Structures are given as C-alpha cells and as structure tokens.
Image: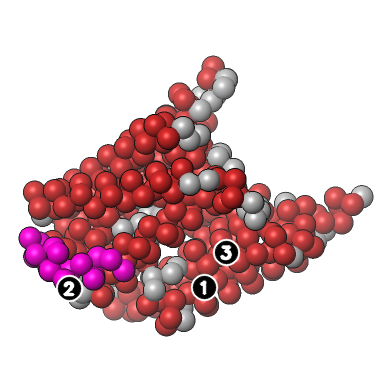
Amino acid sequence: MHKNIYKNRKFEAFLLLFTLAFCSYAISELSVFKNLGISALIIAVCLGALIGNLAHQNANLLKKSGVIQIATKEILRLGIILYGFRITFYDLEIVGINGILLAFLVVFSTFFIGLFLGKLLGLDLKESILISSGSSICGAAAIMASESVVKGGPAKVGVAICTVVVFGTLGMFLYPLAWNLDWFDFFSLKQMGYFMGASLHEVAHAVAAGEAIQAGNGTVIEKMMRVLMLVPFLLFLTLFSVKFLSKNDNKISIRSNIPYFALWFLVACGISSLEILNTNFALDYIKPSIQTLDTLLLSMAIVALGVNIHKNVLKNAGFKPFLMAFMLFIWLIFSNIILVKFLM
C-alpha cells in the first residue's frame, strides 16, 4: 500500500526531477559559471546530492516512485543518443585522419593506463573503469554511459565525476595560463587547440579553454572526436565487462549486453551531417534546441544519480581515486604533447 502511494506520484516525481535539471541548466547559463566551464551536468550531480542528503522526503519520492531507475536508464540513453547531434561527419574532414587517430589513441591508451594504475593502487575494477572513461572520453557523460554497462553503483560514479570536476577544471585554467607564459612555445596556436581538445575532460572545459586563447574551432572539434570514440569504446567495454565483470559468464550473452544506444548515437551523428541540418536556420534554431533538450535529459539522469550519493561517499573513497585521476591527468598532458607534435 505504501509503495503504491509513491507509484501513483510518478508525475510529481518526474516534475521534481525535471525542475532540478532545468535549474542545473539555468545556473550553468549564468556568465560566471560559463566562464568557469562548469557544465549543467556538474551542477546537476551537486543538486542531486543536496536533495539526497538534505531533502529526505523529496529523495524518497524520487526513489520509491521508480523515477530514479527510469532516469538513469532510459532517459540517460536517450540523452547519449541526442548527444550525437553535436557532431557531424564534416568535423572528421576538418581534423583529417590524423585528428581521428589522435582521438582514438588518447581514448584507448588513457583507458588502459587507467586500468593499470587502478590495479596498482588496489582500486575496485569498476571504479577504475569509471574514472578512466571519464578522463579518456568526455567526463560526466562518458562516466554515465559506462555506468550503464558496468553497473558500478552511485557511490563509484559520484567519485568518478568528482575527479573529472577537479582535474578538468584545473586543466581548463592551467592550459591558457601556460600558453600565455610561453610554456607551450613548441606548439602553434592551432596545435595548442588540438592539444587542449585531446586532453581536457569535459566538452565545457574544452570550449572555455579554446575561447580563452582564441584557438578557433580546433579545440572543440578534436574534443568532439573523442566524444565520437564513445561508440567503439562502449562496444569494447561490453565485451570487456562480459569477460571480466560477470560472475556467471555462461549465462550472459554478448548480444544481450550490446549498448545499442551507442549505435543510435552514431546514427544521430549521421543525421546531424545531413545538409538540411546544416543550413543557417537549422544551425541557429534546430540544433541548439536539440542540444538544450539533450542537456536537460542528461541533467535529469545525473540529478537522479546524485540523489543516491550520500555525504560519506567521498570520505569513504579516500585519496586513491584522486591520485589515480591525477596520474591520468599527467599522462594526458605528456602523451598529448608527443602525439599532437607528431600527428598534427
């Protein structure tokens, strides 16, 4: 009877979740947050955590109505699919084969280095996967997409997102400063743009850093090439998870665990490349509308995640996840110096 009361309040729960997601988006649009490169997704996890720890009635409504499960599964997957409209195949032409190769090498080398570091530090494999995916691809969105495959749980996801916030924000401030101090004088401005796109965590971090030194579109386009790597990465992660994370390998088929939403993400990229969606009208109205809807959907999913992050999560996590993320950050810097100088 008690459970049915909450199930009958599903609309109310969805309205609450949407309101929190909308607040995340609205706050991220304020100039102070835009200049700092703080995305709606980062704000969303913070708002969710506040609700989970301080507003227990609202948290119970979201949990017991079943809305959290829907948000972190169906809504999240739809958000990842729509993320594909941010990329066109014309972007591939701009960066060329070397830009695509750069993104591929960065994503997969960082992921495997992360697994090695996680094992060295004695971290749980799922936690290592989540931290590595956030560092190697596109921050919070990649962590959530990976979570849909590995099922690490809210606590591990919360810690992984925190590492993205810390080191992505650090890089966003340090890179333009280092450029202005001529520490990267071995790069041209164009190469510096590619370097930042290939090594920063969140798309918002890349946008802010690129604008800070007026690096043109190179930073964002190279960053989006890393986002595009989400498709082969998730397919690989599915095979990896079936092999190393399943306790009952014989009962789980690869086919039943393929993240089909990743393939739809690729379809969205293809549709985004159509001429009709690259007219002035589409670029000014249609695509921005899709991106806003997508940000709201992803924010809903991450608010739902945040509700399950309790105040003792970071305390219990210790320093090892952040040490691992720091080492990956150093890897991203030095490996990309070599790769960008060689490839771009």
Looking at marks 2 and 3 on the same chain, the residue that comes earlier in the sequence is marked by 3
Task: Name which quarter of the figure residue 202 lies in.
Answer: bottom left
The residue at which mark 3 appears reads as: 46
Check residue 280 for magenta coloring. no
Coordinates of residue 321 in the picture (x, y in percent)? 46, 45
Q: Is residue 115 visible?
A: no
Q: Are marks 2 and 1 in contact (CB under 8 Å)?
A: no
Is 334 situated left or right of 202 in this image? left
Q: Secondary structure at mark 1?
A: helix
Check the image and report above or below for 125 versus 334: above
Mark 2 and mark 3 residues within 8 Å of each other at the beta carbon? no
Q: Which amino acid type is marked by label 2?
A: Asn
Residue of label 2: 180
Nearer to us of marks 1 and 3 is 3
Q: Report helix, strand or loop for mark 2.
A: helix
> Residue at 20% of width from left, 58% of height from top?
195
Q: How far across and down, in percent of the image, does residue 176 sit?
A: 23, 70
Residue shown at the point (53%, 20%) measured from the top left: 249
Rounded to the nearest angstrom, the CA distance separating label 2 from label 1 is 31 Å
Circle 1 residue: 25
Dot 2, how many residues are within 10 Å of its Cα: few (below 14), some (14-19), or many (20+)?
Answer: few
Q: Amino acid at mark 1?
A: Tyr
The residue lying furthest to the right in this view is 1
| Magenta range | 173-188
In 3D space, how far apart are the residues under numbered discs 2 and 3 (Cα atoms)? 32 Å
* Residue contact at pointers 1 and 3, CB within 8 angstroms: no
Relative height, residue 273 to residue 125 (above, below): below
Outermost residue, top side:
250
What SS does tag 3 mark? helix
